[in-house]
């Protein structure tokens, strides 16, 4: 599996593990994402299926991702609905664009708001 070109140099996850992490995000996205919105250019909001396993999986993946890409800020909210907010500083919008495309199921980047 080739390494996506949008993975930033700031990522400290070993190169051979990066495609596996992308696959983990893809699996979560394909199984749990109900909606994709952009409250602002640096913030992606994912509506997830309301299930304890989904929330736990999203939290665990977010915690591991911040261990290698500290520029991410993940906020998991569990209320009437489950949302995962993914925020980045403006210099990492390209990464957020790529995640947005993957979450939306297109594999492409989104147009910026």
Image: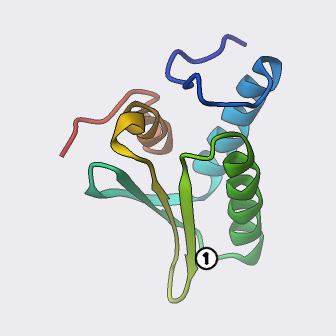
Dividing the picture into quadrants, the one containing residue 109 is top left
Q: Is residue 48 above or below residue 70?
A: below
Which residue occupies the foreground of this view, 71 or 104? Answer: 71
Q: Residue furthest top?
A: 2
Which residue occupies the foreground of this view, 47 or 84? Answer: 84
Q: Position of residue 6 (x, y in %)?
A: 50, 22
Q: Position of residue 89 (x, y in %)?
A: 40, 46
Q: Is residue 81 above or below residue 4?
A: below
- Which residue does the image show at 43% across and 43% down from the upper left? 104
Would residue 2 be found to the left or right of residue 71 on screen?
right
Q: Is residue 80 above or below residue 99?
A: below
Which residue occupies the foreground of this view, 24 or 86? Answer: 86
> Total of numbered circles in the picture?
1
Which residue occupies the foreground of this view, 37 or 73? Answer: 73
Q: Residues within 10 Å of mark 1 (few under 14, many from 20)?
A: some
Q: Is residue 85 above or below residue 18?
A: below
Would residue 39 be found to the left or right of residue 47 on screen?
left
- Which residue does the image show at 65% across and 43% down from the upper left? 25
**Quadrant of image for the N terminus:** top right
Q: Residue furthest bottom?
A: 80
Q: Which residue is mark 1?
A: 50
């Amino acid at each position: 599996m080739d390494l996506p070109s949008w993975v930033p140099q700031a990522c400290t996850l070993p190169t051979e593990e990066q495609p596996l992490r992308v696959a983990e995000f893809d699996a979560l996205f394909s199984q749990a994402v109900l909606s994709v919105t952009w409250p602002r250019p640096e913030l992606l909001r994912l509506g997830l299926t309301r299930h304890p396993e989904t929330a736990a999986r999203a939290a665990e993946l977010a915690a591991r991702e911040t261990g290698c890409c500290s520029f991410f800020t993940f906020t998991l909210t569990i209320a009437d609905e489950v949302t995962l907010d993914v925020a980045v500083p403006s210099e990492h919008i390209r990464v957020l664009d790529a995640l947005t495309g993957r979450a939306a199921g297109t594999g492409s980047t989104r147009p910026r708001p």
